[in-house]
Image (cartoon, rainbow, N blue to C red):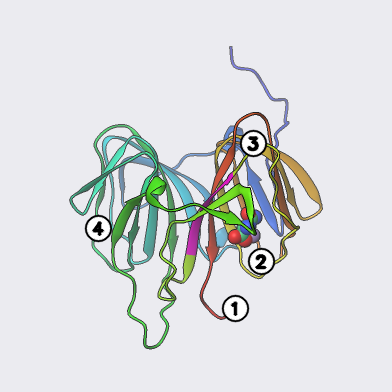
Amino acid sequence: MLMHQLGQTRSAHYRDHLLQTPDTFVRAPLPGMCNATAIVHIGPAGGARFTQYTAEFAAGGSLQPTSEQRFLFVLEGELTLEGRTLHAEEYAYVPAGRHTVVEATISTRAAVIEKPYQPLPGLEAPGFFARRESEIEPKPLMGDPALEVRTLLPDDPAFDCAVNTMTFQPGAALPMVEIHVMEHGLLMLAGGGIYRLGDCWYPVSAGDFIWMAPYCPQWFGALGKAPARYLIYKDWNRNP
Ligand code: UGY
Ligand code: MN
């Protein structure tokens, strides 16, 4: 039986942050999608300078190229692009202007981030690559072994953004309330905890999406008996 939520949700939207929980997701196809649909989490319409969505493909579904750079992280299922097959926890970076068609062999969900590329004079734009998240060496954040960061894009000024995963052991927390010029798109991949955004504290768990505007005060502490893990985007390597 469908349980009515009687107008209640954990989702919230303020000028400097958005918490979007799965009960409020609305699906709609985007141009270039075939047998696929998108949950647009954030984009310029919401005040961000990038777009992030979850693409849900039926078997045989596809996504046409875009003029922007595109980052894809497979959440479940299987995607083929550039002659490669990506499984869950594998990801690809597609440079701006590259004619890369993305196809799903089976029913698949992927996190997609798109952003117009901001070149730097004298630097060649990055090329296409694909990797598995677990191949990236985890690094403790500010010396805390209970909080590990994997930087999915190479440490190279040619990239105008960073995409990381952060894994918090139960009880681990960001060491400080961060307030910074960069904005974030964040997808909770596993576990949960409490996220401070601005002056609000939210319980969050796997499947939730968060957008943080520049300077949004932010802090996270992991709760529960299993690690909490999220995929996080930020603008990077460019003058604000
Ligand atoms: O990279 C970051 O700014 C990251 N530590 N922020 C966050 O987890 N909210
Ligand atoms: Mn941050």
Q: Please, what secondary structure does the residue beneath circle 4 have?
A: loop
Q: Please, what secondary structure does the residue beneath circle 3 have?
A: strand
- Disc 3 residue type? Gly
Q: Please, what secondary structure does the residue beneath circle 1 have?
A: loop
Q: Nearer the viewer, residue 182 or 90?
A: 90
Q: Name the residue under label 2.
A: 214
Mark 3 or mark 1: which comes first in sequence?
Answer: 3
Q: Residue 100 carries which label?
A: 4
4 and 1 marks in contact (CB < 8 Å): no
Secondary structure predominantly adopted by residues drawn in magenta: strand
Mark 2 or mark 1: which comes first in sequence?
Answer: 2
Query: Is residue 163 rendered magenta in the image?
Result: yes
Residue occupying the far top of the picture: 1
Q: Which of 26 and 211 is in front in this view?
A: 211
Q: Nearer the viewer, residue 67 or 196?
A: 196
Q: Tell me how far mark 3 sits from mark 1, CA to CA.
A: 31 Å
Quadrant location, the N terminus: top right
Q: Tell me how far mark 2 sits from mark 1, CA to CA.
A: 10 Å
Q: Mark 1 points at which residue?
A: 240
Q: Tell me how far mark 3 sits from mark 2, CA to CA.
A: 23 Å
Q: Please, what secondary structure does the residue beneath circle 2 have?
A: loop
Query: Is residue 28 shown above or below 117?
Result: above
Question: Where residue 56 appears, x then y in whole percent?
Answer: 39, 39
Question: What are the residue bounds of the magenta stretch?
Answer: 162-167
